[in-house]
Image: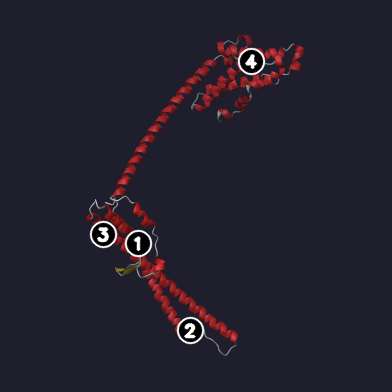
């Protein structure tokens, strides 16, 4: 348990000097003891603080601190419980005794002599020696802490250098990334959207081909249902008008569902083919970019800027591929507008 959490130590800090002086007693108060008590309390407080901040402090030293705290608390209790009305008939003997004890304690601390108080404060003979020892231990602990902090600062500085070197390396790697690397990304996207490949009797396909198969299956199912609707959902014209209406509506709902299903799968196929075509086009644009940019004079910033604008259009505009209508293919021009603010001449 930490010393600061000890009940006696807590009581020690609660016993403020001003609360012990009984100033309401006027001339019979303990005002004259204020400087003595304040000094003793300050010394003991410093010892407690050093003990808290110093690791591996010898047990003998901490034991001494507890003795000093208990003695101070004993004097504080006598002063707090002092009753002038009870003490007056005796000529204030109890008050004089308390004053004498505090003064004797001061004498023992400063001179190491307690012969006049019958050894009551004998453990205070070495008070100043203990105080000085604790101060030295505190300085040692502070020096060790400063050494540890210096080591931490050096370690942080080394880590910072490692971090800066890593950032520099990443910047170099980023600078090495070419347009062909980005073209490869678009190629991979186009491949995932649409491809058909048979290798070692294993067929792989993109999303478009899967939706194409689904479209064929949906159309086949719709045609089959259309030619067999009378068997699948017969209409009994001999029944009443209500039943006939329900049966006809059932046919209509089923046929409408299949029409909607066919529309959805065909549209999904078109979207995937549209995306595959766009990404293939973007790949081709980036692969040919270096050829064009190197063919333009570095001083011809106007042509270079125009080329950048066309490349941006090719990348960020959806364009027309024939798979989706113009309303579905509209693209945002915000990224294209940004290219107008690129500093000319930095595209090489």
- Quadrant of the snapshot with the N terminus: top right
For the image, the number of numbered tags is 4
What colour scheme does the image use?
secondary structure
* Callouts 2 and 4 close, C-beta under 8 Å: no
Q: Within 10 Å of the Cα at label 1, are there few (<14), some (14-19), or many (20+) other Cα atoms?
A: some
Work out how far the residue at label 2 is from the one at label 4, CA to CA, in angstroms: 114 Å
Q: Check disc 3 and report the residue beneath it.
A: 288
Q: List x then y, in percent, for residue 209.
A: 36, 70
User: Would you say 340 lies left or right of 71 here?
Assistant: left
User: Would you say 347 lies left or right of 27 here?
Assistant: left
Work out how far the residue at label 4 is from the one at label 3, CA to CA, in angstroms: 96 Å
Q: Secondary structure at mark 1?
A: helix
Q: Secondary structure at mark 4?
A: helix
Front-most of 276 and 238? 276
Q: Earlier in the sequence, mark 3 or mark 1?
A: 1
Rendered image: mark on residue 229: 2
Q: Earlier in the sequence, mark 4 or mark 3?
A: 4
Q: Check disc 4 and report the residue beneath it.
A: 33
Front-most of 179 and 166? 179
Q: Check disc 1 and report the residue beneath it.
A: 189
Give the image quarter of residue 158.
top left
Q: Secondary structure at mark 3?
A: helix
Farthest residue, direction right? 89
Query: Which callout, 3 or 1, points to the residue nearer the camera?
Result: 3
Q: List x then y, in percent, for residue 312.
A: 33, 58
Work out how far the residue at label 3 is from the one at label 1, CA to CA, in angstroms: 18 Å
Q: Earlier in the sequence, mark 2 or mark 4?
A: 4
């Amino acid at each position: 348990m930490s010393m600061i959490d000890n009940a006696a130590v807590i009581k020690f800090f609660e016993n403020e000097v001003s609360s012990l002086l009984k100033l309401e007693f006027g001339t019979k108060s303990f005002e004259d003891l204020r400087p003595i008590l304040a000094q003793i309390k300050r010394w003991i407080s410093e010892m407690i603080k050093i003990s808290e901040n110093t690791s591996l402090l010898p047990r003998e030293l901490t034991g001494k601190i507890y003795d000093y705290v208990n003695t101070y608390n004993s004097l504080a209790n006598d002063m707090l419980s002092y009753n002038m009305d009870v003490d007056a008939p005796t000529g204030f003997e109890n008050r004089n005794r308390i004053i004498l004890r505090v003064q004797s304690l001061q004498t023992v601390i400063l001179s190491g002599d307690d012969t006049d108080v019958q050894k009551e404060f004998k453990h205070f003979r070495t008070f100043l020696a203990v105080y000085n020892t604790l101060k030295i231990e505190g300085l040692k602990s502070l020096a060790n802490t400063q050494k540890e902090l210096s080591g931490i600062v050096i370690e942080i500085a080394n880590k910072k250098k490692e971090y800066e070197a890593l950032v520099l390396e990443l910047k170099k790697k980023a600078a090495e990334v070419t347009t062909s690397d980005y073209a490869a990304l678009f190629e991979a996207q186009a491949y995932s959207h649409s491809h058909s490949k048979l290798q070692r009797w294993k067929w792989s396909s993109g999303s478009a081909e899967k939706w194409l198969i689904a479209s064929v299956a949906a159309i086949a199912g719709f045609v089959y249902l259309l030619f067999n609707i009378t068997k699948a959902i017969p209409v009994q014209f001999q029944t009443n008008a209500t039943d006939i209406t329900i049966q006809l509506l059932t046919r209509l709902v089923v046929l409408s569902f299949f029409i909607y299903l066919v529309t959805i799968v065909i549209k999904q196929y078109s979207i995937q083919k549209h995306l595959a075509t766009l990404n293939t086009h973007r790949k081709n644009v980036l692969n040919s970019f270096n050829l064009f940019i190197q063919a333009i004079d570095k001083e011809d910033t106007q042509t270079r800027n125009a080329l950048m604008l066309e490349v941006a259009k090719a990348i960020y505009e959806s364009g027309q591929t024939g798979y989706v209508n113009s309303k579905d293919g509209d693209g945002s021009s915000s990224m294209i507008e940004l290219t107008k603010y690129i500093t000319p001449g930095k595209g090489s």
